[in-house]
Amino acid sequence: MNTYRSYEDLPKIKLPMEQPIFISDSTIRDGSQMPGIIMNTQLKYKIYQYLNKIGIEKLETFVYHDRDKKAIRMMLDHGYEFPEVTGWARAVPADIDQVLAIDGIEETGILMSVSDSHIIDKMGLSSRKAAEDKYLNALQYAVDHGLKTRAHIEDMTRADNTNFVYPLIEKIMDIDSNCIIRLCDTVGYGVPFSNVDEPFGIPSIVKQLKSNLGVKNIEVHTHDDFGLAVANTLAGYWYGANWSSLTFLGIGERAGNAELEKILLFLTQRVEGFEKYNLESIIEFSKFMEKEIGIKVPRNKSVVGKNIFAHESGIHSSGVLKNPFTYEPYPPEVVGGERVFLIGDSSGLELLRHKVQDTLNDFMDIEIELKKTDPRLKMIQQEIQELYDTEKRISCISDEEIRAYVEKYFVFKPIARQETHHESIYGEFNEERD
């Protein structure tokens, strides 16, 4: 019989193909295109440093403006092995020349839009054949000038893959067999279900690329318009992709991209073999993005939200106090977080006892263990509940207010009394809520 009472007891998932997998971060490339986001040179450089702390393998960036080039120079001059700084270009030689002009960049992505809407309506090309010629010429130019390549197959989940995209990818592989084929789910139409065929099924596309076309390097780049970006990214890994393209906090155009922090957490905590990533700076990274770039992180956002390790309800708080595993899926320190207990309308006596005891010990510089049967706790609980019952309170009770209650009931009244520790003096109290 299996017993699961600690994090160590739980088994980890194995990727079925057991392929080594990697991450390319696009926070300062795709993420910078988020409306209202402005990233200056120092911000980009700081993001690069956080990615280094985590252990991300690659970072992609624009190379068009002086501010882009200055940030890249700062990154390259720092001398980190990871993340490798890579470029991004449209499928024109002039763009690729700008990448080539930066000493130290050895790889570039090349945008290859493949849906008819993008080819004809956006780019104004006459046909799929014209698009193919344009893309292959640009790829050949990059290879001839010594660059490693990454083909951004844009809008693949709304394209005619069988009749156009897969034949195009075969020709790409003929030019550069090591080219990373980036499967771009540009407006989030992809789904992670294994029995869905093209153009929507991420599993079917990855299997086609890997098994039938022999693509060595497959990267999944997903957008979150339908809320499936993380699921589609994991599906890509599950069916054989070895790269994913992510942004921190999922920033990007419209609904954004698959979140780097979510994929990292899933890999390190749930999948076997990903000790190479260090998530201890994730919370710090998130606070930096909030403060310096102005991104508002919802309180309940997984991994980085302020409520992730905050407990208020009586049942949950009591469980966590006894064994954090009961209601916390992973320890706070994994992502550099801290556990917080809050007193609110659903808090029970055990949580109140814990908060009052900590406050009292800190206030008096002593070590006292309060009993749940101490009548003063009951008095404090009744006062707090009256605030909520009369609807005079719509927020949690602050630590400062708990301190005031401690002063009122434990300081201005004697505290060094036997009754504080022995319930026999007061008799048994009914424990209404845990």
Image (cartoon, rainbow, N blue to C red):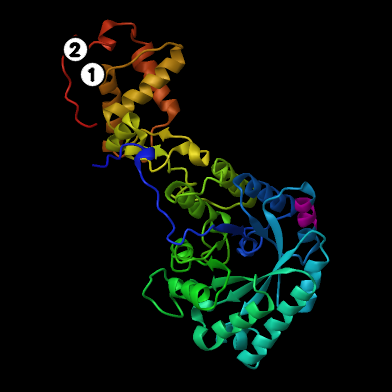
Camera-side residue of 158 and 15: 15
In the rendered image, the vertical position of residue 217 relative to residue 81, given as above or below: below
Q: Is residue 364 left or right of residue 25?
A: left
In the rendered image, the vertical position of residue 278 relative to residue 342, given as above or below: below
Do labels 2 and 1 touch, CB within 8 Å? yes
Q: Residue at x 50, y 78 (%)?
A: 212
Highlighted range, magenta = 70-76
Element type at marker 2?
Answer: loop
Q: Is residue 85 left or right of residue 385?
A: right
The residue labelled by disc 1 is 373
The residue labelled by disc 2 is 426
Kindly report the distance in space between the C-alpha atoms of the residues bearing marks 2 and 1: 8 Å
Q: Residue at x 64, y 59 (%)?
A: 37
The N terminus: image quadrant: top left
Q: Residue at x 80, y 76 (%)?
A: 94
Q: Position of residue 159 (x, y in %)?
A: 52, 83
Q: Position of residue 233 (x, y in %)?
A: 49, 63
